[in-house]
Image (cartoon, rainbow, N blue to C red):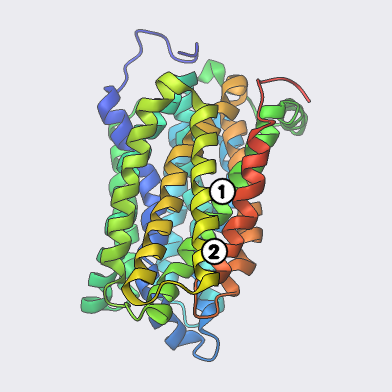
Amino acid sequence: MTDHIPSDAPRLSQGEFIALIAMLFATIAFSIDAMLPAEPAIAAAFTPDDPNRAKLVVGSFFLGMGIGTFVSGPLSDAYGRKRVMIWGGVLYSLAALICIFAQSLEVLLAARVLQGIGGAGPRTVSLAMVRDLYKGREMARIMSFAMMIFMVAPAAAPLLGQWIIHFSGWHAIFIAFILFAVIAMTWLAVRQPETLPVAARVPLSFGGLWAAGKELFSYRIVVVSILIQALTMAVLVATISSVQGIFTVEFGMEEAFPKWFALAAAVSAGASFLNSKLVMTMGMRKVARLAFIGVLVMTVLHYGLMRADILQGNWRFAAFFLWLVSLFCMMGLTMGNLNALAMEPVGNIAGFAASIMAAVSTVVAVILSTPIAQAFDGTHEPLVIGALLCITPSLLLMRVLGVPSRV
């Protein structure tokens, strides 16, 4: 435990705390994955001549989230965790309201960026809240359980999005976002005690932020973790941006897409549960390294089968689906561990650290993933190539992810 919270301070049970953190994460997952079935309708409404542009509704949210994380962490260090998350939820909801009334793709994308900025509060500050209360392998274990529950959201979100579109049109998805955010923020406000007492807060100042930044980037483990997280997240963003088009154009399975996506997400939730067990005995580095090795082997084999053009029909889809599941499992076995490793030496600036690490990795991930997603040509070959280009250096960087030494 850190010394932020006195041992006799009121706190949630571990089970409820994990569920709350998972729901805060799920706000983000829901905001991304529920939009996937809406991409064809958005393309038809705003950009029929260039349907690939509709995929930017995913990347724009990630971009806003990356921008927002630059400020949400330092603000939470200065004013407390709960206040920043709740105000972030308010901004998120207002942006969703703008999306409902958007009359052009440009306005919609701008509102999605704003929505991502608001969503950065719950996403980033919740990590600092976990760091306030836990550390080391126990923190990684808590994050794994939260990630496991969090994976239910991607499983259900496309199905819910498809159901909403069927009955009320794609605009109604944003009403669901607002309702979800209101529930999550109310739970946070009513049940969760503040984890950063006034005495431990750090007033905002340029000098203080500069000193915190110098300290943060003086740790080799932080710098390398950010690079690996950016590369890993780039694969996720590119996959989520492309997967609906792959199912629709390459495999002719537009209506079945939400069900298969739900199955992939549900299966990969087991990876987070497995990580919560393995990390306590094998350690964070070894689990993450083995995960990268496994998915790299899967990707190389899959690309070889594609180039050889051996598989056709259902066999081709089965190979793609297994590879898709491996990508999602990679997230469950790596991201929580990488976050925990990087946060370990910077507990004194947890909010700032969580903010900057998430911001840099997310913005870099969006930059790397956008050309991969926009290269979609009716097949998933560009995505496989992009994944190879991101996973390979991630594995190489794991070799230099050493102890929390200074650079």
- The quadrant of the rendering that contains the C terminus is top right
Tell me the element at label 1.
helix
Q: Nearer the viewer, residue 264 or 77?
A: 264
According to the picture, the residue beneath numbered tag 1 turns out to be 232
Does label 1 or label 2 sit earlier along the sequence? Answer: 1
- Mark seen at residue 306: none
Image side of residue 30 versus residue 259, left or right: right
Location of residue 155 in the rendering, given as x and y in whole percent from the top left corner: 29, 56
**Viewer-side label of 1, 2:** 2
Location of residue 259 in the rendering, given as x and y in whole percent from the top left corner: 25, 65
Location of residue 180 in the rendering, given as x and y in whole percent from the top left corner: 30, 53
Quadrant in which residue 253 is drawn = bottom left
User: Where is 4 relative to 35, above or below?
Assistant: above
Rounded to the nearest angstrom, the CA distance separating label 1 from label 2 is 21 Å
Residue type highlighted by circle 1: Thr
Q: Are marks 1 and 2 in contact (CB under 8 Å)?
A: no
According to the picture, the residue beneath numbered tag 2 turns out to be 304
Tell me the element at label 2.
helix
Location of residue 392 in the rendering, given as x and y in whole percent from the top left corner: 63, 49
Q: Nearer the viewer, residue 129 or 270?
A: 270
User: Where is 129 relative to 152, above or below?
Assistant: above
| Residue 194 seen in render | no
Residue appearing at x 28%, y 47% in the figure = 183
Image side of residue 373 versus residue 127, left or right: right
Residue appearing at x 49%, y 76% in the figure = 379
Residue type highlighted by circle 2: Gly
